Amino acid sequence: MYKFFCAIVVSGLLSFQALAQAPKSTARMPIDETSKLITYAKVNEVAGQSKDVLFDRALEWAMGYYKNPTDVIREKDKEGGKMVCKARYKISNPPDKKGLSTDAGLVQYTLNIQFKEGRYKYELTEINWKQISYYPAEKWMDTANAYYKPEFEFYLQQVDQQSKEILKSLEKACAVAKAANAKDNW
């Protein structure tokens, strides 16, 4: 009886240790130390550009990048040097055996952009899966959660790729001054 009891206790401890060391997601997402949210943030220097010029470039980018910019741009304060965009994009489930990917829903995010003389800062954060209630994307990283699904890893890859594409497009728009039209240069 004593050996049986010890075997149960030891197996229980080993199981508890295995649960305590459950692996986190393999996706390498940038996590903000303060908010503990997935956050893509960067300060970009644009020498010789005023705050207003940078704001105008970012606004022009948003007006062209988003299909419905009046719905996406929630705050635009040129004087204060701040713009807030709340947008969403579709994600898909992993392809099945036949290669067919089905719709997994929408991911929403907040893009905060701040402007100062010669530089701007962006922060893409508050990434969440559009559900009946708020479902933060950070939950997809917790493989020990009882509700974890293997598809979550695929969702995180899509979020990472889409976030990087959005920010690359913004950086390109803010960094490059439009070339003067040759006909206007007289």
Image (cartoon, grey):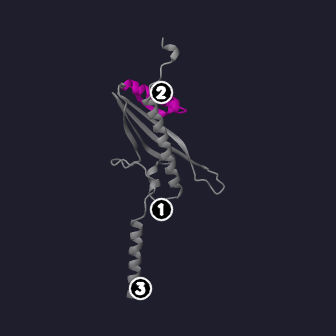
Residue 133 picture location, percent across and down: 48, 48
Circles 1 and 3, Cβ within 8 Å, touching? The answer is no
Can I make out residue 48 in this image? yes
Nearer the observer: mark 2 or 3; the answer is 2
The residue located at (42%, 67%) in the rendering is 19
Say the numbered circle drawn on residue 51.
Answer: none
Identify the amino acid type marked 1: Ala
Q: Which residue is mark 3?
A: 4
The residue located at (48%, 30%) in the rendering is 61
Nearer the observer: mark 2 or 1; the answer is 2
Say the numbered circle drawn on residue 60.
Answer: 2
Q: Which is nearer the eye, 77 or 18? A: 18
Circles 2 and 3, Cβ within 8 Å, touching? The answer is no
> Disc 1 to disc 3, how far (Cα)?
30 Å
Q: Which residue is mark 1?
A: 146
The residue located at (46%, 30%) in the rendering is 173
Q: Which is nearer the eye, 158 or 178? A: 178
Circles 2 and 1, Cβ within 8 Å, touching? The answer is no
Q: Which is nearer the eye, 52 or 111? A: 52
> Disc 2 to disc 1, how far (Cα)?
44 Å
The residue located at (40%, 75%) in the rendering is 12
Quadrant of the image for the N terminus? bottom left
Identify the amino acid type marked 2: Glu
Residue 56 picture location, percent across and down: 43, 25
Direction from residue 126 to residue 98 in the image, left or right:
right
Task: Give the magenta-colored segment's residue range.
Answer: 51-78
Vertical side of 126 occupied by 23: above or below? below
Identify the amino acid type marked 3: Phe
